[in-house]
Structure formats: C-alpha cells, structure tokens
Image: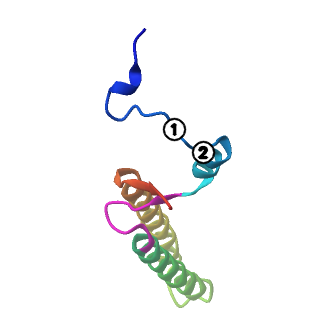
C-alpha cells in the first residue's frame, strides 16, 4: 500500500468541514497590478468628471450656446473614456494576485 503522507505538503488536514467552508466563504482580496482601490477611485473620478462636463456641454447645446454637434461629440467621448476606464479596472484586477483575508 502506498503511503501519500511521506511526501512533503501531503499531510492530512486537521480542519473540520465548518472551518473549510468558512475559509471558502472569505472574500478574495483583489490586489491588481496597481492597488485596486486606488484604480477604482481614479476611474470613479475620471468618469464622474466626464459626466459632469458632458452634462454641462449638453445643457449649453440645448440653450443654443454651443453647437449641437459638440454635444454629440462630447457624448461619444464620454462613452469612449468610460469604456476605457472600465476596461483598465478589469484588466488591472485580472492580472493581479488575489489573497484570502485571514
């Protein structure tokens, strides 16, 4: 009969089923290549400022202080910047290493 416990790292677990289930329920902290919290904060700031600027330009266009073409361009630009920031956040978290909270 082959004894698997002679290999290093193959010691039997002393944890109960409840302890194992509790460990699996702990959230995985996503660190990302850059700190995930910082990246999300920057993305939030950039997207919020884009929304604010786009709203201001659209209001100016509605009251004929700006060309309607400028309003459409600002909406498209906001969409592109929002998609780029969202993609950056996702890629940052995908390539980062995750750890379970202790």
Characterize the local packing of mark 1: few (<14), some (14-19) or many (20 or more) Cα atoms within 10 angstroms: few
Instruction: Tell me the residue that label 2 is attached to.
Output: 20
- The picture quadrant where one finds residue 61 is bottom right
Q: Which residues are magenta?
A: 28-37
Instruction: Tell me the residue that label 1 is attached to.
Output: 13
Against 67, residue 39 (above or below) is above
Mark 2 lies on a secondary structure that is: helix
Q: Nearer the viewer, mark 2 or mark 1?
A: 1
Against 45, residue 23 (above or below) is above
- Residue 83 left/right relative to 55: left
Question: Of marks 2 and 1, which one's residue comes earlier in the chain?
Answer: 1
Q: Position of residue 85 (x, y in %)?
A: 42, 65
Q: Residue at x 37, y 69 (%)?
A: 35
34 magenta-colored: yes
Rendered-image quadrant of the N terminus: top left
Q: Please name whichever residue, 85 or 17, is drawn nearer the observer in this view of the structure.
A: 17
Q: Position of residue 29 (x, y in %)?
A: 48, 60
Query: What separation in Å lies between label 2 and label 1 (alpha carbons)?
Result: 10 Å
Q: Residue at x 32, y 66 (%)?
A: 34
Q: Please name whichever residue, 102 or 42, is drawn nearer the observer in this view of the structure.
A: 102
36 magenta-colored: yes
Q: Pointer 2 and pointer 1: residues touching (CB < 8 Å)?
A: yes
Mark 1 lies on a secondary structure that is: loop
- Residue 101 left/right relative to 98: right
Characterize the local packing of mark 2: few (<14), some (14-19) or many (20 or more) Cα atoms within 10 angstroms: few
Q: Residue at x 36, y 35 (%)?
A: 9
């Amino acid at each position: 009969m082959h004894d698997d416990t002679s290999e290093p790292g193959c010691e039997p677990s002393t944890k109960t089923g409840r302890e194992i289930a509790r460990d699996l329920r702990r959230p995985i902290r996503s660190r990302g290549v850059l700190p995930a919290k910082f990246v999300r904060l920057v993305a939030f700031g950039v997207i919020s400022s884009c929304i604010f600027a786009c709203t201001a330009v659209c209001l100016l266009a509605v009251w004929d202080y700006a060309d309607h073409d400028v309003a459409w361009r600002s909406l498209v630009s906001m969409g592109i910047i929002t998609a780029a920031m969202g993609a950056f956040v996702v890629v940052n978290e995908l390539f980062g290493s995750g750890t379970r909270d202790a």
